Image (spheres, rainbow, N blue to C red):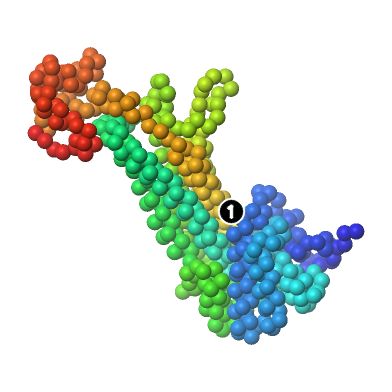
């Protein structure tokens, strides 16, 4: 038969199943915050980071003689187990909650305390031997433990996102090399402009995304700064002398990250500027990615009545009524993902602005927005690469034919016959349907065939050399 235990806080007593490693404060949070239905266990890197923070704190408190060695060692051993994901199913509080993340912090404190108690040979809830607040939360408050864990988790989550974005950029770069000898028409304002290489078009996509890797690196440096030891507001209350520096050093060793202690702990406890910066980077990349997907949809449009310069991999039937129709479903889903991330940036902006005095209590929704945005962007980049970009093929003959029959190539004649003569040729070609070549060479004799051939070589079309 299942058994239960009684736990208490200053609001009263509650019964918990004895199988639960969480305690009474987590239980209250489960009752109070049924918002997203997404528990913090859905972000295992966050759970891991919470364990890192509690481990670092226990080690620093042991060093400074604040925690007895046997209790500190038990907490460290429990944190190591939690960090592996063994107890992820005990981290159940909702990602969005009131209390500035206190419920998340207490969820971690309670689980770690009860794991430690079992390892020490005691029953869950027998907190006289290892207490969630007195021992696991020693020299901390939610206001430094939560944001520190959040920043560690963000840092680690960005590693995977950066790798996926880089792989997508590399895929575009490889297509650029594959398409380097394909002539096509460049377009501005959806109108014919001047010729270019399809390789240059895809290499530009790669360059556009590689720029974002640098912005990710900048953002990671900003979130390397932590406020451990600030405790409630930055005054270091309840923290022993030397603790902020000691716990920061332990966290550097535990995480392998280049963490640094903020110079002004009061400012660092309420400031959310690093999150705004990171959110802006995610939004910037989402905007770029969506624009690229718009281009892929346009370039593959048709196939008979659109641009049709490239083919996207056919993944599924595109219509319940139109036989044979195939839609650009992957660029479409990436577009929609980008829209979400752009909206989440507004959430982060408003939450950051809503901070008051010595604390920003809106950090849970910031964490939810950033975690989901990074996850969605990672998934979108992987999907776009694997399901679309690496399978793109070019319609070389069609793309080159569009160039040869385009009025836009008249721009190449500006230095030779002048802008006004070129404009007249363009006007007549548009009106009559005749080619620029026939009007300029055959009918008007404005240049010889030899000069035409010199001007309109493949190399000169994609890498124009000024000539008169």
* Residue 25 higher or lower than 36, as above or below: below
**On the picture, is 3 further left or further right than 237?**
right
Q: Nearer the viewer, residue 103 or 46?
A: 46
* Residue 283 higher or lower than 45, as above or below: above
Q: Residue at x 40, y 20 (%)?
A: 305
Q: Residue at x 78, y 77 (%)?
A: 128
Q: Residue at x 30, y 31 (%)?
A: 184
Q: How many marks?
A: 1
Kindly indicate the quadrant of the structure image that contains residue 153.
bottom right
**On the picture, is 129 further left or further right than 407?**
right
Where is residue 187? Give x, y as percent. 30, 32
Considering the numbered disc 1 on the image, is that residue within a helix, a strand or a loop?
A: helix
Kindly indicate the quadrant of the structure image that contains residue 450.
top left
Q: Which residue is mark 1?
A: 368
Q: Is residue 205 visible?
A: no
Classify mark 1: residues with Cα within 10 Å, few (<14), some (14-19) or many (20+). Answer: many
Residue furthest to the right = 1
Kindly indicate the quadrant of the structure image that contains residue 355.
bottom right
Give the position of the N terminus as an image quadrant: bottom right
**On the picture, is 292 further left or further right than 356?**
left
Q: Residue at x 70, y 61 (%)?
A: 87
Where is residue 115? Give x, y as percent. 74, 69
Where is residue 54? Give x, y as percent. 63, 71
Residue furthest to the bottom = 65
Q: Is residue 210 visible?
A: yes
Give the position of the C terminus as an image quadrant: top left
Where is residue 92? Give x, y as percent. 70, 57
């Amino acid at each position: 038969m299942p058994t239960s235990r009684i736990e208490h806080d200053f609001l009263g007593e509650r019964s918990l199943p004895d199988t639960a490693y969480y305690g009474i404060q987590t239980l209250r949070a489960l009752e109070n915050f049924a918002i997203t239905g997404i528990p913090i266990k859905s972000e295992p890197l966050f759970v891991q980071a919470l364990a890192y923070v509690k481990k670092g704190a226990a080690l620093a408190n042991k060093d400074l003689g604040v925690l007895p060695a046997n209790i500190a060692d038990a907490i460290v051993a429990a944190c190591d187990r939690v960090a592996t994901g063994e107890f992820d199913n005990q981290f159940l509080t909702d990602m969005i909650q009131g209390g500035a993340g206190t419920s998340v912090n207490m969820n971690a404190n309670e689980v770690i305390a009860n794991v430690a108690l079992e390892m020490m040979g005691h029953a869950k809830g027998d907190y006289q031997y290892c207490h969630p607040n007195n021992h696991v939360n020693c020299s901390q408050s939610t206001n430094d433990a939560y944001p520190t864990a959040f920043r560690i988790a963000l840092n680690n989550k960005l590693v995977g996102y950066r790798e996926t974005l880089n792989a997508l950029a590399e895929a575009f770069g490889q297509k650029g090399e594959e398409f380097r000898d394909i002539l096509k028409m460049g377009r501005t304002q959806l109108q014919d402009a001047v010729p270019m290489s399809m390789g240059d078009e895809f290499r530009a996509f790669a360059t556009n995304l590689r720029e974002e890797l640098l912005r990710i690196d900048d953002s990671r440096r900003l979130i390397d700064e932590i406020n451990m030891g600030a405790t409630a507001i930055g005054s270091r209350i309840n923290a022993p002398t030397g603790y902020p520096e000691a716990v920061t050093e332990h966290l550097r060793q535990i995480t392998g990250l280049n963490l640094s202690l903020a110079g002004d702990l009061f400012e660092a406890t309420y400031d959310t500027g690093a999150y705004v910066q990171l959110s802006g980077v995610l939004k910037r990349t989402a905007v770029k990615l969506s624009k690229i997907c718009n281009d892929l949809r346009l370039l593959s449009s048709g196939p008979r009545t659109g641009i049709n310069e490239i083919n996207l991999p056919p993944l599924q039937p595109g219509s319940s009524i139109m036989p044979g129709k195939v839609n650009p479903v992957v660029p479409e889903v990436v577009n929609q993902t980008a829209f979400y991330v752009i909206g989440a940036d507004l959430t982060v902006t408003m939450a950051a602005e809503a901070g008051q005095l010595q604390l920003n209590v809106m950090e849970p929704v910031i964490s939810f927005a950033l975690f989901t945005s990074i996850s969605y962007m990672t998934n979108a980049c992987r999907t776009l690469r694997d399901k679309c970009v690496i399978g793109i093929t070019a319609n070389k003959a069609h793309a080159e034919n569009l160039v040869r029959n385009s009025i836009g190539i008249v721009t190449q004649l500006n230095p030779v016959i002048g802008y006004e003569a070129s404009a007249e040729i363009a006007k007549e070609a548009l009106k009559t349907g005749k080619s620029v070549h026939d009007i300029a060479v055959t009918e008007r004799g404005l240049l010889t065939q030899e000069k035409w051939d010199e001007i309109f070589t493949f190399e000169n079309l994609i890498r124009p050399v000024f000539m008169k």
